[in-house]
Image (tube, rainbow, N blue to C red):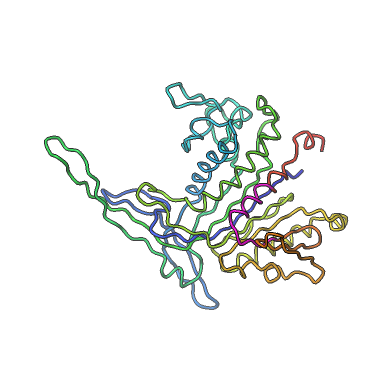
Amino acid sequence: MPYPPYVRVSARVSVETSVLTGSGSIGNYNTHAIATVIFKRGTDPPKVYEVPVITGNAIKHWHALYLAETYEALGGKNLNDLCRKGIGARGYNVKASIGGAKLQKAESEEEAIKDLCNDIHGFLNPEQQIKRDSLVKVSFGIPILEEEVLEVASKYSVTHNRVIPVKNVEEEMMVFKQEYSSILYGFSMSMNLGMTLIPMYSGGAVSGIGNIDNERRLRVKASLLALLPLLQGSASKQARALPISRVEELLIVLSKLPVPNIVHAAYPDYLERSIELVKGYVLSVSTLSDKSKSDTNTWILCYSRHHNRCDPRTLSQLPRDSTTSKAEDKETEEFTIDNLIKIKRYKDIGNMIKEAAEKASDMVQPLESQKSA
């Protein structure tokens, strides 16, 4: 049976003079991660570009960090010291502390996923022969696949000086170089959050958490709200290069159905193609009785700095019998397809993510109802 909510995200972010992902050093020269992409226009031969990127692993790290911060801000308490402090070592039990006591590995998946980060972002304990797949999957962030963007996407080095104390010398300067990048990049995420606090590889159940369904809703809500700091703060070397960034576009799909991954935001037509995919899937698997009940099962939320880019009538080629309405706050516009899919256009990205988090947490099904089904 499905375990909603199923969340799909694609976003475009403009970043200036930042270290999206470091990739090591050569002497005193710190390098930026790069990758190869291929661009093809019409019948022209393909062109190969070497471009700066942010890895999916890096985005995943930042999401885990902001997830923990947001979860605690919402009143959550079930996370260990490693999760709380953004340390990527996982598989330890929820009481693990780095304050001197020995870190204890969890002995079962049920024990491990009491901790927020083990639950949402997965873990592997080879010695105990237990693991959990991540509920959050993230692509590389790459420059938008348009020739004019790829031609100017660049990395470059800046020389820094660090003052270091030296014996018998008042001070000495240590010179090092750091590579930075300036790009408009896109990335995508897939989050199957309905599996939170449900073991994947064992038949047991999590105990000792109190109201487990409230805890599950809290974790889902925090996972969505963490997108706000993630979109503005995913980069390395933040002490000297806090990201200069701005969200250009954001598409979020929330569904009670296991909808396919949407199109990566690096593609020029990702908005149109993503909505086509979701609409085709939802209308195909929903029955005629579903369509007559006025029971929405999928929400498509869209934000763009260029407001017309998110016009649902243009994007989804809405049928003539689709219904439309404008929200009272005039910050959203809402469109419905066959009583099943609701498309909303936003001018306010904060309000959009807040509403996405609330809808996603409301989709969580009580564990007892899942067992009986």
The question of residue 111 being in magenta is answered with no
Residue at (36% x, 57% y) in the render? 180
Q: Quadrant of the C terminus?
A: top right
- Extreme front residue here? 329
Between residues 122 and 63, which one lies in front from this camera angle? 63
Residue 106 % position (x, y) = 56, 26
Residue 328 % position (x, y) = 71, 60
Quarter of the image for residue 211 reads top right
Residue at (39% x, 50% y) in the render? 22
- Extreme left residue here? 168
352 is higher (above) or lower (below) than 112: below
Q: Quadrant of the N terminus?
A: top right
Quarter of the image for residue 324 reads bottom right
Residue extent of the magenta highlight: 344-358
Residue 275 % position (x, y) = 68, 63
Between residues 159 and 288, which one lies in front from this camera angle? 159
Residue at (72% x, 42% y) in the render? 364
Main secondary structure type of the part rendered in magenta: helix
Between residues 201 and 115, which one lies in front from this camera angle? 115
Residue 194 % position (x, y) = 69, 42
Is 350 positioned to the left or the right of 168 in the image? Answer: right
Residue at (49% x, 47% y) in the render? 57
The question of residue 351 being in magenta is answered with yes
76 is higher (above) or lower (below) than 343: above
